[in-house]
Image: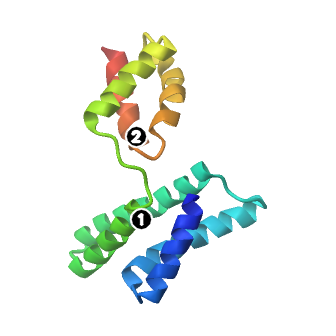
Amino acid sequence: MSLKDDISNAIKEAMKAKDDVRKVPLKLAMAAIKEAEIEKRAELDEPEVLRLVQKEAKARQEAIAEAETANRQDLKERAEAELAVLKEFLPDELSQAEIEALVEQSIAEAGATSMADMGNVMKVIMPKIQGRADGGAVSQLVRQKLQH
């Protein structure tokens, strides 16, 4: 079953259970998916759907940070609950050790020796970490490894 189908089924279950905490973020994710399909005029593939769910999760993380800044515990708790729901549909995140191993492997695979090769390393590693690690953090780690 596809990720889109999983989300659709989860929405139906949340509606039957009258569970707004689950229903709201899932409906927003589905709306983003449908909007992207309308723009594309075709059905999205799994990586595209995954990217949209990640985008929704990132929006919740930003909402948590903003709620902390504004000292609004109620908004923070709501955003955290919605983020937890969305994380159910995302692949498990990689550990720091796994990320470092993938960076080392990708540097070797790309034959990188200097910062000039960073783009090639990123091309190799990004498909491997898609949805399982923060691209910015991985980029920073690649940069550190190539500078030494």
- Residue at (33, 25) in percent of width and height: 101
Residue that appears at 47% across and 56% down? 54
- To which quarter of the image does residue 22 belong? bottom left
The amino acid marked with disc number 2 is Gly
- Where does the image place residue 133, in percent across and percent down from the top left? 38, 43
Q: Earlier in the sequence, mark 2 or mark 1?
A: 1
* Residue 116 visible within the image: no
Q: Is residue 105 left or right of residue 39?
A: left
In the picture, the quarter occupied by the N terminus is bottom right
Check residue 134 in the rendering and tell me which mark sits there, or answer none: none
Q: Nearer the viewer, residue 139 or 51?
A: 51
Above or below, 77 relative to 46: below
Label of residue 136 in the image: 2
Quadrant where the image shows the C terminus: top left
**Is the residue 37 above or below the residue 9 in the image?**
above
Which element carries disc 1, helix, strand or loop?
helix
